Image: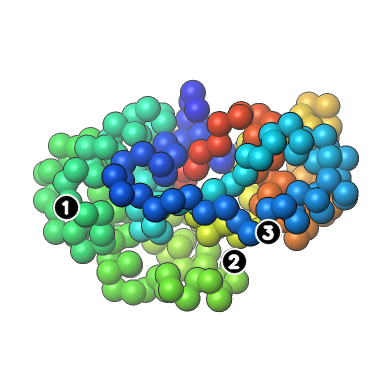
Amino acid sequence: MKKVAKNGLNGLASVEAVEVAEPAATVPGYWADACRHLMKKDRVMKRLIPQFGDACLQSRGDAFTTLARSIVGQQISVKAAQTVWNRFALLPKKMTPGNVLRLKVDDMRAAGLSARKIEYLVDLSIHFDAGTVHVKQWEAMDDDAIIAELVAIRGIGRWTAEMFLIFYLTRPNVLPLDDIGLINGISQNYFSGESVSRSDAREVAAAWAPYCSVATWYIWRSLDPLPVLGSEQN
């Protein structure tokens, strides 16, 4: 959490902070089965998973707020992102798409948001307000269909969409090959620190399916014991 990096560990303060009456965290129901599968199929997972005890991925908050925070946190440090988010979150009575669309640009700029991030937040709000993202249907949609909806929003790229699938929707089998943290973690845990290609990473991850998200989470944890959401760098 010390520096900006395009990986699942740095770039956005965790979704835990601002909302006062935040919903309780939700633990994926498949987690225990996933751990058993991974420890059986992969020697590194057999070593890593027991090191973290009962810790696991937990989803909380709502989809709109999660994505808004990912935009606010782009290309700035975790500390700066938290400061800007705290100021921005005070502007609407409640963090909803309609309320964000009613905010004044000058007030958003005063909270520390750049003109580009304001444009991104407005576009995000328009998509949610107009129903062009089908939040209630996501449970029945496959990962690629959800990613296609999300990357149509300005400021959200495939990597952010994959982080959203892992951290918010807790989809079990996402393999974010553009993630620097995952590639570095595979290098350290499987190749003694030697550089690895996307092809190398995909070959390692073949043993992880259908729980690539879980394995990725443990790879991240091996690099940094404090898991947080990431943010896109465009």
The mark lying in front, picked from 2 and 3, is 3
Q: Is residue 135 above or below residue 231?
A: below
Quadrant hosting residue 156: bottom left
Residue at the disc numbered 3: 30
In the rendered image of this protein, does residue 183 appear above or below residue 210?
Answer: above
- For residue 141, above or below residue 206: below
Mark 1 or 2, nearer chain start: 1
In the rendered structure, which disc, 1 or 3, sits on the residue that comes first in sequence?
A: 3
Counting from the top left corner in percent of width and height, residue 82 is at 34, 34
Disc 2 element: helix
Give the image location of residue 206, x and y in percent.
82, 54
Q: Position of residue 24 (x, y in %)?
A: 44, 51
Please name the residue that numbered disc 2 is placed on: 143
Q: Nearer the viewer, residue 187 or 89?
A: 89
Residue drawn at (56%, 41%) of the image: 8
Q: Earlier in the sequence, mark 2 or mark 3?
A: 3
SS type, badge 3: loop
Give the alpha-carbon distance from disc 1 to disc 2, as whole Å.
33 Å
Residue 175 visible within the image: no
Pointer 1 and pointer 2: residues touching (CB < 8 Å)? no
- In three-dimensional space, the C-alpha distance between marks 2 and 3, rounded to whole angstroms, equals 17 Å
Give the foreground label among 1 and 2: 1
Q: Is residue 188 left or right of residue 107?
A: right
Does any portion of residue 161 appear in the rendered image? yes
Q: Three-letter amino acid code at disc 3?
A: Tyr
Q: Which residue is mark 1?
A: 93
- Give the image location of residue 67, x and y in percent: 40, 53
Quadrant position of the C terminus in the picture: top left
Q: What numbered label is drawn on residue 185?
A: none
Of the residues shown, which amino acid type is indicated by label 2?
Asp
The structure residue drawn at horizontal position 55% and vertical position 31%, both measured from the top left corner, is 226
Check disc 1 and report its element: helix, strand or loop: loop
